[in-house]
Image: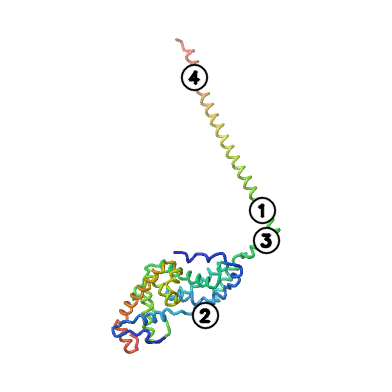
Amino acid sequence: MTPAIAKPMQFATAASRAALDFASLVHQHQAMVFSIALRFLRDRAAAEDLAQDVFLQLHSGLGMLESEDHAKFWLRRVTSHRCLDAVRRKQPQTVPLEDSPEPAAEIPERDAMLEARLWQAVGSLPATQRMIVVLHYQQELTAEEIARTLTIPAPTVRSHLRRSLLLLREKLTRLTAAPGMKRMQGTGEPS
Amino acid sequence: MNPDSFKANESGRMSEIELESALRHTLRSEQPPAGFAERILAEAARREQGSAISAPQRGQLIRMPGLRFAAAAALLLATSLGIQHRAQQQEQAQGQVAREKVLLALRITSSKLHRLEMRVSQLQSDDASPN
């Protein structure tokens, strides 16, 4: 799948081109691009590299973008597709729960443990479902917007979302029901 | 983060709202490391300098009348040289074909002459025989 690598849309007007300043686009959208990559790839260095590549691709095709909205849509679309391509190049597509690295977040111990479980559960989802979950819960995109971003039908997005929630609930229930987790929830101490 | 957002009920199950809220928190947006944007801008600038002539500069060069004339003359010269080279090649190929035809004709003539010579010498030897 490579629409991600496609050039930005053509036929931009001279005025709109002049209005699009690369530096301000980078500052404005760096968190979005980096966060999609980070939550999907679950690897800080890989997310940083991917985000940089996306912005450099934007730089080379900047003159063809029509507006701020177009640039934002393009960035989100290219980031998503590049993430999916990166994961598909590595096999297997899904990571077993127990092999998922936990996020190094500086948050209270109890929340950190619970968040890590959810992070693990999300990481074990198949690539497309994981990307849909990231785009929906991080970027607050509707099924239709996700469909346009990933070039898949909206009903497919909805069914992936439903299935992902079921899977996540099941995995989380299993993980939180684990002995270490129960003890931690009860005492607030790490297992 | 609200600690209750991850709280499971007695059976260990989370409600849909709790799960969605937990997902929003876990997948929350995050700023990239400090200096990230500056590194991108520096790399973009480096790449821009790397390409000897940028697209707008190329456009400006093409708009210069003297340069336009020189480019047209160079193109015309290259085209005429190409045509001349092609004609020369065709001529050479035709020459080669003609040469091969002549050689073949000579080979045929030589073989015929050889056969005639053989026949004449045979006839002469027949005449010279005693009976």
Residue type beneath disc 3: Arg
Alpha-carbon distance for marks 2 and 1?
A: 52 Å
Residue at screen point 46% across, 12% down: B129
Say whether residue A24 is left or right of residue A183.
Answer: right
Q: Residue A45: x, y in percent?
A: 46, 75
Q: Earlier in the sequence, mark 3 or mark 1?
A: 3
Q: Which residue is mark 3?
A: B63
Residue type beneath disc 2: Ala
Q: Which residue is mark 2?
A: B34
Q: Which residue is mark 1?
A: B74
For the residues beneath circles 4 and 1, the answer to whether they share a chain is yes
Q: Please state the chain letter of the residue tagged with numbered disc 1 in the rendered image.
A: B
Residue type beneath disc 4: Arg
For the residues beneath circles 2 and 1, the answer to whether they share a chain is yes
Q: Is A98 or A158 nearer to us in this picture?
A: A158
Residue type beneath disc 1: Ala
Q: Residue A97: x, y in percent?
A: 34, 75
Say whether residue B69 is left or right of residue B5.
Answer: right
Label 2–label 3 contact, CB within 8 A: no
Q: Which residue is mark 4?
A: B119
Label 3 sits on a secondary structure element that is: helix
Q: Is A117 or B122 nearer to us in this picture?
A: A117
Mark 4 surroundings within 10 Å by alpha-carbon count, few (fewer than 14), some (14 through 19), many (20 or more): few
Alpha-carbon distance for marks 2 and 4?
A: 105 Å
Alpha-carbon distance for marks 4 and 1?
A: 68 Å
Up-down relation of residue B123 to residue A102 (above or below): above
